Amino acid sequence: MTVPHAATLAAALEAAAVVLSAVSGMITAAKKQMDIVGTYCLAVVTALGGGTLRDLLIDRRPFFWVSHQEYLLVIVPLCVAFVYSRAFHARVSRWHGQAVLVDAMGLALFTLTGVGFALHSGLPPSLRRLLASLQARSAASSATSCPWRFR
């Protein structure tokens, strides 16, 4: 069964997951008192880490963020607003603080995109499950530590 506009839906889910995960990385950077460079780096790693691992595992080239460089560009104004606008920072932090909504939504969306790519990769079912789980897990754990240089 083919879902109409499946590619559009997958792209929308991936974009939403990237943005939500970038925001999660920015919040983690703020908690660790990082500067704008550290905030951007952690946001990018958090937003793109899981998809990069997925692309490595299924040997997909170019990586999704190379094909869609706009992800890197969208994260810049988000980071600038987050670091330099108290109102934006307060709103996003308050939203994040309510049951870690941003992390959960980003993780869910990355899991969905991972499942979609796993289904179309031609891998056996057990490896598809592993691929989807690894993508979601790496997206969730990307922001758990940060280099001291960015503090």
Image (cartoon, rainbow, N blue to C red):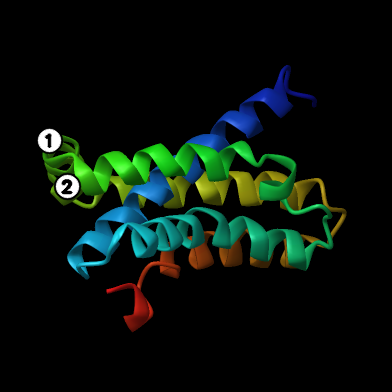
First along the sequence among labels 1 and 2:
1
Left or right, residue 70 beside residue 81: right
Residue 81, percent from left and from top: 28, 39
Residue 66, percent from left and from top: 72, 48
- Dot 1: element: helix
Residue at (63, 56) in percent of width and height:
51
The relative height of residue 35 versus residue 62 in the rendered view (above or below) is below
Residue at (44, 43) in percent of width and height:
76
Residue 111, percent from left and from top: 54, 51
Of 27 and 149, the residue lying toward us:
149
Kind of residue at badge 1: Ala
Quarter occupied by the N terminus: top right
Q: Which mark is residue 87?
A: 1
State the residue position of label 2: 93
Q: Which mark is residue 126?
A: none
Kind of residue at badge 2: Ser
Q: Residues within 10 Å of mark 2 (few under 14, many from 20)?
A: many
Residue that extends furthest to the right in the rendered view of this protein: 122
Residue at (19, 36) in percent of width and height:
88
